[in-house]
């Protein structure tokens, strides 16, 4: 019996494999709406709230932030929440035009205004107050102070 030479199939197989698109393995990436994410940061939603609304885990959200913004969630959140803070401040100033309570609140927080309550205590002079005052003056003199009369 004559043996026939075997044909090499490695070239054909390799060629066939390289022409086929490679199947991706694993779970498909979650699609996160960037505008919705930034809006939630502006509303100062917590990490847990953002994850719940977007339907992702905190690790997924952190990875997405690194891919999209090049930094972590907390750094992106700090930048994007400033937009919400400005919006809130504008709303407060508009409300202060109609509400005295809001105007007082903003005055205290932005202008350093305070409520000053003046307390004046009056005692009947029955001699006790005079004795107490004299004793305080003597103690003050003993400490080296000068009492003006």
Image: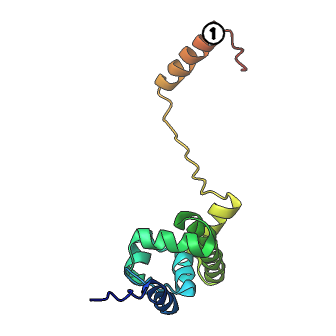
Q: Is residue 138 left or right of residue 128?
A: right
Screen quadrant of the C terminus = top right
Within the image, what quadrant is residue 101 found in? Answer: bottom right
- Residue 25: give x, y in percent of width and height: 39, 81
Q: Which residue is mark 1?
A: 143
Query: What is the crowding at mark 1: few (fewer than 14 residues within 10 Å), some, or many (at least 20)?
Result: few
- Answer above or below: position of 19 versus 127: below
Q: Nearer the viewer, residue 22 or 128?
A: 22
Q: Is residue 147 left or right of residue 28?
A: right
Numbered circles on residues, count: 1
Element class at badge 1: loop
Q: Nearer the viewer, residue 7 or 77?
A: 7
**Residue 123 in view, yes or no:** yes
Q: Nearer the viewer, residue 138 or 45?
A: 45
Residue at 64 percent across and 76 percent down: it is 83
Screen quadrant of the N terminus = bottom left
Residue at 41 percent across and 69 percent down: it is 58
């Amino acid at each position: 019996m004559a043996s026939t030479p075997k044909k090499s199939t490695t070239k054909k197989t390799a060629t066939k494999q390289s022409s086929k698109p490679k199947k991706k393995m694993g779970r498909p990436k979650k699609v996160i709406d960037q505008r919705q994410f930034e809006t939630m940061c502006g509303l100062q939603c917590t990490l847990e709230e953002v994850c719940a609304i977007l339907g992702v885990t905190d690790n997924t959200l952190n990875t997405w932030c690194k891919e999209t913004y090049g930094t972590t969630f907390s750094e992106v959140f700090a930048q994007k929440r400033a937009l919400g803070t400005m919006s809130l401040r504008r709303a407060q100033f508009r409300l202060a035009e109609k509400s005295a309570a809001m105007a007082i609140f903003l005055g205290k927080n932005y202008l350093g205004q305070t409520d000053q309550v003046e307390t004046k205590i009056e005692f009947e002079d029955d001699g006790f107050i005079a004795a107490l005052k004299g004793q305080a003056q003597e103690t003050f003199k003993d400490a080296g102070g000068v009492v003006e009369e």
